Amino acid sequence: MRRTLFRMRLPLAVFIIIIPVLWGVGFAIFYSAFTTHAHGDYFRLETNHLDLDFPRNWYAVPWEEKNSSGDRYGVLLAPTDIRASMFMVIYDENAARLYLEQNNVTDAFSATIFELKRLHNWALQKNENATLSFIENETISLFGHTGNCSTLIMEGGFVDDQGKFYNWTWTFMSFIDGKIFQIAYHGVEGDYDLAYRNFQFILNSTKIKLGEEK
Amino acid sequence: MSEYLSRYSYLVHIALGGMICLFTVYIFLSISPIGIRMLLFHLGWLGLLAFSEGTNAMLLLVLATAYLPSGFCGGLYTGYKIKENLRIIFVLPALIGLTGLIALRFFSGTFNLSYLNIQNEVLIPLLGNVVGAYLGVYTMNWRTEEARPSETLELDLSQVKS
């Protein structure tokens, strides 16, 4: 039996060979995934509940939460270089019913207001002087459903690690049609404007399966 | 008495091997995922981590850069200090290292039992540590051809017929 390889002890040689082999396989899988999901400067994310395109260097985290009171699905999208992100959440019929009952919400407008109040209360825990200023509040039609969209600024709503306060801009949308579909995107100070074009692109590329069966 | 001390020192060396394994995996795990993400960012591939293929590939790279080398380091120390019962002993530093890692994650709040991903958080680290420790232990105790004592033929002169 041969006991050395390249004049090294066999286990050492095997260890040294395994590392680059694993790297090679890992990057081959990455490349294969890249060729499968790349659409120009974007990646196409397709889940059971929504399809969307997002920029290639953004984080995207799809998630599901299933329990006896209903299922929730969503995706979190965030760039790595600026303080902005986007959330999409879908409640199935059971989860939507529970959400409406528990939060005393009746329509898309009241759902948006409820979430914004919750957000403001959360910001007040960090800065009790954070104020809420509505920029616009409108009825919108998206994905074949009519919903509500509100944009607002929380002045001093974002607090960084050094305790410095920043204005925080949020846009929140709700659609209720048996299921509930909510979208929120936000940015700190000018980061909202920097990410706005990408937010709009993601929104326009999104196809939700609100009324469809899985 | 000396046998008792010898057995005791075995346990100490196994525990030290496990601690080396834990220390190195902790260091490598705080460096390698960040490095891999930076590399993906420069390639414009960071978004691939949203897909299952991407997370599997990431896991392979972390296996290669953190779990295998840390098991190997723990195994090297254990193999250097202990020369007997290697077939059983090589597993112990790996298990100590993994148990320590899980305990560290649990107490720091990053190991959630209700959302436990057994493959990513237990099986792959265990595989990496055990294989690394096996290779490390046997690297220190590998008998090479050069190291073997040379076998000499002795000639019995009485049997030589003139």
Image (tube, rainbow, N blue to C red):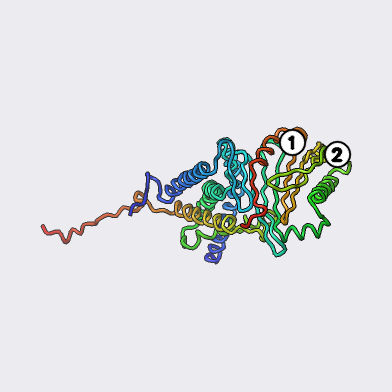
Q: Which residue is mark 2?
A: A133
Coordinates of residue B92 in the picture (x, y in percent): 54, 60
Q: Is residue A73 above or below residue A83?
A: below
Q: Which residue is mark 1?
A: A192
| Front residue of A191 and A205 | A205
* Mark 2 in CB contact with mark 1 (< 8 angstroms): no
Which residue appears at 60% of the width and 47% of the height?
A: B29
Coordinates of residue B28 in the picture (x, y in percent): 58, 46
Relative to B8, A143 lies left or right: right
Which residue appears at 69% of the width and 38% of the height?
A: A200
Seen as rendered, the residue at the extreme right is A129
Relative to A163, B145 lies left or right: left
Amino acid at dot 1 = Tyr
Distance between the alpha carbons at the discs numbered 2 and 1: 16 Å
Dot 1: element:
helix
| Front residue of A133 and A136 | A136
Coordinates of residue A86 in the picture (x, y in percent): 70, 43
| Front residue of A95 and A214 | A214
In which quadrant of the rendered image does the N terminus of chain A lie? bottom left
Q: Is residue A121 above or below residue A165?
A: below
Label 1 Cα crowd, 10 Å radius (few <14 / some 14-19 / many 20+) = many
Q: Quadrant of residue B105?
A: bottom right
